[in-house]
Image: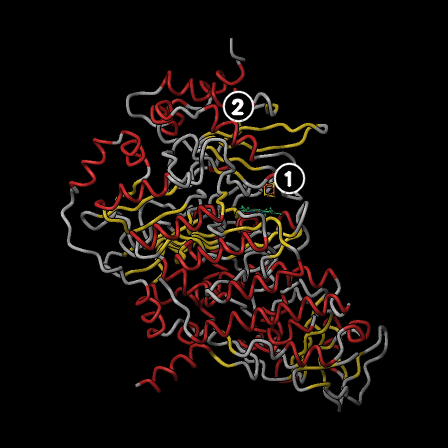
Amino acid sequence: MYRYDEFDQRFVEERVAQFRDQARRRLSGALTEEEFRPLRLMNGLYLQLHAYMLRVAIPYGTLSSAQMRKLADISERHDRGYGHFTTRQNIQYNWIKLEETADILAELASVQMHAIQTSGNCIRNVTSDPFAGAAADEFEDPRPTGELIRQWSSLHPEFSFLPRKFKIAVTGSPNDRAAVKAHDIGLRMIRNEDGDLGYEVIVGGGLGRTPMIGKVIRGFLPKAELLPYLEAVMRVYNLHGRRDNKYKARIKILVHEMGEEPFRKEVEREYARLDVESLAAPAEEVERIQAYFAPPALENLPEESKAFERARTADPDFRIWAETNLHPHRAPGYTSVVISLKPVGGAPGDATAEQMRVAAEAADLWAFGELRVTHEQNLVLAHVKKDDLYPLYRKLAGAGLDSANRGLVTDIIACPGLDYCALATARSIPIAQRLTERFADPKRQRDIGPLSIKISGCINACGHHHIGHIGILGLDKAGAEFYQLTLGGDPTETAAIGERAGAGFSAEGVVDAIERLVDRYLEIREPSETFLQTYRRTGAESFKDALYAEAG
Amino acid sequence: MPLLNEKGLQEEIWRELEDHEPIPLEGDVIVPQARLEEALAAPRTGRTGVALPNTIEAETLQPLFNRLSLITVEFPGFGDGRGFSIAKRLRGLGWRGELWADGRVIADQLAYLRACGFDSARIPEDLFARQPLEDWLAAAKTISAAYQTEERAPGVASILEQRKAARAARG
Ligand code: HEM
Ligand code: SF4
């Protein structure tokens, strides 16, 4: 993975010093609260319901075991002994004191981490495929692109005061696990007919109150032209994005209001004016970055592992876990492992300091000391020998990290909601907890098969509810929480925004409603059909009917 | 209004035209965009500058570049970053004259302004009272090197070039 050189290190250290000075000037009155706010946001610091929240960047979701241990230490020293992994592949601490922030940032800098641009109206932390560099279906590792964008966008002089936040995601696999079509810019690495590597550039996706799927603005952009092209897109957005209404300020609204074709023309016109050569990343820099992402030293192994087979037969719990929580690796005898942060009754994405340390230790023992955070709020060990799976599983089980539910109905995404968030209109975590309890039976979960439920505590959609197979949006109706359902959402290459199912449900009623949906699916599905496939085949009506025919 | 950059306070030699004031024939004046044609048509001996709103299409000004000595770009608030891109465009179109950011920018933005091609910032008195010159001089220096290749403030080094030099030194 990428490691800072002396220059990256100096950069984050100077940034910490800069933040200390900004905090000092806020206290002295030189900066007003209004002026300080965007500066602290660009260092990941939010004011929330009960305390400050600090959002730490995990660029493209990759981190080392040493970094994970530091995150654990920080959660003990400055929070309440746990952290919250988020849909942005970052970690958030929910109980931070303003006066400790600069110290936390300094601690992060000591392990090459930071909170730069995890918030604010700037280019945010780049996200990517959690199986990058390992997945069997990948043809190019997206992380070097992510790192290039991280560097280019860090403290960008022109693009730090945009109309609104700006999120970029990259995938290097035809199977999109980074939800690139739901980002302000999504980049899909592709090859053209000549075999040259490049990007399909997708612009104007986004969730929030006006969910939209991104549009392809450039079918093939040669790899070397990435940064200049991004600059052209960003400049058009910075100049023309709406600033009169923050709910209409995202680039998706600009693309929508201008129209896809005029927007494309405007970008190409801007691009034609640029000095592409001087803006492009120097080839030697691209190579330097690329070298950090060379695959680890994998052994030549047979595809099948005897130790794995034996353990599978001997321990049925392990067998069940291995059925759901592994992801195909490109090297024979290896696999990627998903560590679920979705235990029954737990808050999705929460990990205790102890769990972070166990995950770090597992990474050291069996996964080249490297971890990933997924946008589904789980962790991944990318390169694990099948021979090592059983001891790894035992270790995870000892820390409650063995939930066998990746991609299943209890692998729920939920935003912090009214338990933490100042903008929330309803709670989301307790709904997730009750759903996992309702569907706790492992046999039932596996019978239901792949099904993603995503919950947001308000219209801002941090829980990605629009792209959940079943989305739950928590709202407030005359002082009571109620929950609106959307069906058929999809974050992948076949991206779709879920359709609203109809009238909402009370906090008490919503779990039953979901169960009716799931039961209806089980009734009408064809053999081996997933929930989403059934929904697409039959349409909304049969599901609505189950929802509103009130059980019995 | 104080005019400043990382070298300190700059001398104020330009005068801003008052509303409804006739175009003076002598002296260096800044005129609003709406009166630019009028000012350029007048038999003036002094230099002419123009104050642009941040909604301007920079191209529209290009034909007049050689008749102007100063362009100022409005910053209605520090959070409205359009001016940064307008400066980049003006420089990209070949503007080599003076370029000021005019409005409520803050000390922490000075390096960004300079990187985008502004020479100086002209800020309101009340803001200057709160953020004295030391703040501006210090803020301009906090980040010593940047990742961007093309756009950097004077005195801010290029990380990519530092890397290259370090590689060369290692041989
Ligand atoms: C707890 C405090 C949080 C606040 C105040 C907050 C605020 C917001 C707001 C206002 C939006 C809507 C933006 C827009 O439509 O322009 C949004 C969207 C979003 N936030 Fe959050 N958020 C919070 C937590 C989170 C968490 C925990 C995550 C996961 C990392 C997250 C990830 C997202 C995502 C993925 C979106 C949708 C992106 C899109 O609109 O395209 N947020 N957030
Ligand atoms: S969706 Fe709403 S409630 Fe949930 S974290 Fe985002 S802003 Fe807060």
The residue under the point 45% across, 56% down is: A69
Q: Quadrant of residue A461?
A: top right
The residue under the point 55% across, 30% down is: A431
> Where the N terminus of chain A falls, by quadrant?
bottom left
Relative to B124, residue A153 above or below: above
- Residue annotated with mark 2: A511
What is the chain letter for disc 2?
A
The residue under the point 60% across, 72% down is: A17
Position of A233 with respect to A134 (left or right) is right
Q: Quadrant of residue B160?
A: bottom left
Q: Quadrant of residue A439?
A: top left
N-terminal-most mark, 1 or 2: 1
Marks counted in the figure total 2
- Residue annotated with mark 1: A424
Looking at this rendering, what residue extends furthest in the bottom direction? B45
Front in this rendered view, residue A313 or A150: A313
Alpha carbons under labels 1 and 2: distance apart:
20 Å
